[in-house]
Image (cartoon, grey):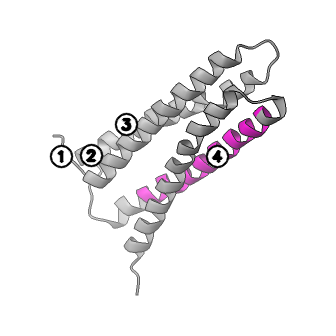
């Protein structure tokens, strides 16, 4: 029989994959967005919106399952890797709120410098991926920092 902890851990890992994975899709999408016609641009921007929505909802499951894992598991809230991950998580949530949706909305406004917005989106993807992968590293490696 599967333990509750193992089931929560599986859900936590699956939601991490679903939170991080869509952002790798953005790398080729951004390249195609540069030369796309208006209809194609709208399709790519809809892909962005949908993937961000998926990542946000998976992130909710990720946080909830992480909280439950700490409650039922043997890790302390004051463990250095956990504190560091939570700090990065809060920073990444603040970054996510301002990194994508406003730029996508601005992209569709007439008279905007689309190349500049694409550069900003590309930069935001790489920064957010770095934040997510750093958190993933802390969760997997569980380093002792202090």
Helix, strand or loop status at disc 4: helix
Q: Is residue 98 above or below residue 92?
A: above
Residue 62 falls within the magenta-colored stretch = yes
C-beta proximity under 8 Å, tags 1 and 4: no
Q: Check disc 4 and report the residue beneath it.
A: 51
Q: Which residues are magenta?
A: 41-66
Q: Residues within 10 Å of mark 1 (few under 14, many from 20)?
A: few
Helix, strand or loop status at disc 1: loop
Q: Check disc 2 and report the residue beneath it.
A: 81
Q: Quadrant of the N terminus?
A: bottom left
Q: Check disc 1 and report the residue beneath it.
A: 144
Disc 4 versus disc 2: distance between alpha carbons?
A: 28 Å
Q: Is residue 3 above or below residue 115?
A: below
Disc 2 versus disc 3: distance between alpha carbons?
A: 10 Å
> Percent position (x, y) of residue 11?
48, 65
Whichever of labels 3 and 4 marks the residue nearer the N terminus, that label is 4
Helix, strand or loop status at disc 2: helix
Q: Residues within 10 Å of mark 4 (few under 14, many from 20)?
A: some
Q: Check disc 3 and report the residue beneath it.
A: 87
């Amino acid at each position: 029989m599967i333990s509750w902890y193992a089931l929560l851990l599986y859900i936590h890992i699956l939601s991490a994959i679903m939170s991080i994975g869509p952002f790798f899709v953005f790398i080729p999408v951004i390249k195609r967005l540069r030369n796309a016609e208006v209809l194609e641009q709208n399709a790519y921007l809809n892909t962005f919106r949908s993937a961000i929505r998926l990542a946000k909802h998976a992130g909710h499951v990720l946080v909830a399952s992480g909280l439950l894992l700490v409650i039922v598991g043997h890790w302390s809230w004051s463990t250095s890797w956990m504190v560091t991950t939570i700090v990065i998580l809060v920073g990444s949530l603040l970054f996510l709120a301002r990194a994508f949706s406003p730029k996508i909305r601005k992209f569709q406004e007439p008279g905007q410098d689309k190349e500049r917005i694409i550069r900003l989106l590309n930069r935001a993807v790489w920064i957010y991926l770095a934040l997510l992968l750093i958190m993933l590293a802390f969760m997997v490696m569980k380093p002792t920092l202090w």
